[in-house]
Image (cartoon, grey):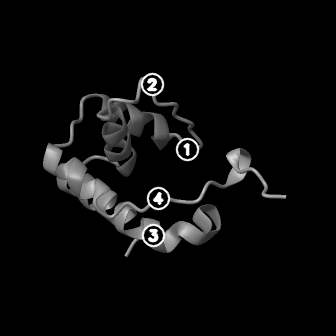
Amino acid sequence: MLYINAGKYGSTVHIDRPIIERVAELAEKHAVSRIAVSLAWLMQKKICTVPIVGATKASHPEGAAAAVGFKLSKEEVTYLEEPYQPHKVAGALHKSSS
């Protein structure tokens, strides 16, 4: 089982876990990083023009570079998206109801 930082992902960890596990599964299947799978998914979306990648570890830019030549099949994209559940807006964009 994957470790998921509940402090970072807060109350959505139980909702997001299936997607995170599927990303890890596809990364292992294709021998690429989870970063590469995630960015490949993002870059295959029509609404994405340029993903902004923040790197806090040396492996992050390498994973991002690997995503450039990596494509997911339509079936794999569907597999990643199938368990998705919308989240309530939180953080900087969240407007208080008061």
Nearer to us: label 2 or label 4: 4
Between tags 2 and 1, which lies in front?
Answer: 2
Residue that carries the numbered disc 3 in the rendered image: 15
Tag 3–tag 1 contact (CB < 8 Å): no
Q: Secondary structure at mark 2?
A: loop
Mark 4 element type? loop
Q: Is label 3 in a helix, a strand or a loop?
A: helix
Among the 4 quarters of the image, the one containing residue 36: top left
> Which residue is label 1 attached to?
57
Foreground pick, 2 / 41? 41
Count residues near mark 2 (Cα–Cα under 10 Å), then give few for <14, some for 14-19, many for 20+: few
Q: CA distance from mark 3 to mark 1?
A: 26 Å
What's the residue type where badge 2 is placed? Answer: Val
Q: Secondary structure at mark 1?
A: loop
Mark 4 / mark 1, whichever is N-terminal: 1
Identify whether 85 is placed above or below 76: below
Query: How crowded is the residue under tag 1: few (<14 C-alpha within 10 Å), some, or many (20+)?
Result: few
Q: Residue 83's x, y, as percent?
A: 32, 64
Q: Which residue is mark 2?
A: 50
**For residue 86, which numbered disc appears in the image?**
4
Q: Earlier in the sequence, mark 2 or mark 1?
A: 2
Badge nearest the viewer, 3 or 2? 3
Q: Amino acid at mark 1?
A: Lys
Residue 85's spot in the image, x, y percent?
42, 62
Measure how far apart labels 3 and 2 are at the Cα level.
27 Å
Instruction: Give the residue drawn at x 53%, y 59%.
Output: 87
Q: Is residue 19 above or below residue 37?
A: below
